[in-house]
Image (cartoon, rainbow, N blue to C red):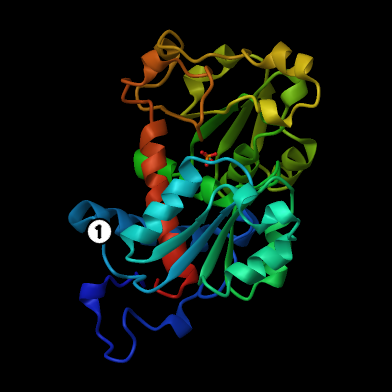
Amino acid sequence: MTFMPPTHNNNPHLPFGDQRTAPWYGKDILSVKQFDRNKLSYTFEVAHEMRIMVERIGAFDLLKGKILANLFYEPSTRTSSSFTAAMERLGGSVIPINEVRYSSVSKGESLPDTVRSLECYADVIVLRHPEVGASSLAAKYARKPVINAGDGIGEHPTQALLDLFTISEELGHLDGLTVTMLGDLKNGRTVHSLARLLSLYDVKLNYVSPEILKMPKEIIDEIDAKGLQQSEYKQFDDVISESDVLYVTRVQKERFKDKKEYESVKGAYVITPKTMVKAKEKMIIMHPLPRVGEISMELDDDPRAAYFRQMEYGLYIRMALLAMVLGKA
Ligand code: CP
């Protein structure tokens, strides 16, 4: 375990461990493709330590004096506020730009210039942007670490990391599981990133979606090349009983050009207490949230409903990632 909370400092010259040897120090986090099993284990160990520290003492000064620029070109509740909470629980502070229309972006400032401006004030930049590849572009120009908080229908790596951490913490292992992904598998960047991460383990993947919202072929081919078992379905009744994880996603209205097409699929699946009759006793239901009707609120009291706990795991993962790229873990 390389993470050292402040109370365990044993080097008088370096406050919380030697940042020069910290493996993620100064690195960008742009894609789940940067992670292998060892790197995931390391990240989860740090996140687990963060969980213990938050449960024990709430906040501590690991990143005191550090500043995060939280730059969001698209709406967010969870990602934005959990990065803010993560930084503040670690003793750092945040420049929040959640409404770019009130920043110089509205005057036509480019993304490269915006990140080069923010890094004059901040030590790390978290970016959400509607265009695929925007985080890579920002990272090309920035001297400080950039963390991708979602780029269009591309990737949402910190969500996938927190999703995998949720499964690991809730079920205790990853190998041997059957994971069923349901809903908008075409536009849902979270399922693209999560499927890629899961392909590092010995898992079976089921995809349940309407015909027009199927998992993209390039992802299926990529996972196929790793030899994993994958199956596609139209109805979740066919797979609910064998699933260890049911990962539900929202149909992403904002990604549809044709609103009639959206209307035709928006209510395709609704998970209710009745659905759960066939489910395993230890299955967990996950959702990146927000939900818009695809999981009934009547299910929220079922202990298998892990989607609110999942958000909390996101805090610990984002604390870990900030500490890692700032050389404190
Ligand atoms: N899961 C997720 O990315 O939520 P937000 O859009 O609220 O950040």
Write the residue at 40% across / 16% down: 297
Q: Residue 179, position in %: x, y?
A: 53, 32
The C terminus, quarter of image? bottom left
The N terminus, quarter of image? bottom left
- Residue at the extreme bottom: 13
Q: Residue 65, position in %: x, y?
A: 37, 74
Element under label 1? helix
Q: Which of 275 and 328 is in front in this view?
A: 328
Q: Residue 291, position in %: x, y?
A: 51, 25
Please indicate whether residue 176 sits to the left or right of residue 301 in the image. Answer: right
Q: Nearer the viewer, residue 192 or 176?
A: 192
Q: Residue 101, position in %: x, y?
A: 64, 48
Callout 1 amino acid:
Met
Q: Dot 1 corresponds to which residue?
A: 53
> Is disc 1 surrounded by few (<14), some (14 to 19) or many (20+) residues within 10 Å?
some
Above or below — where is 270 with respect to 77? above
Q: Can residue 44 be seen in this view?
A: no
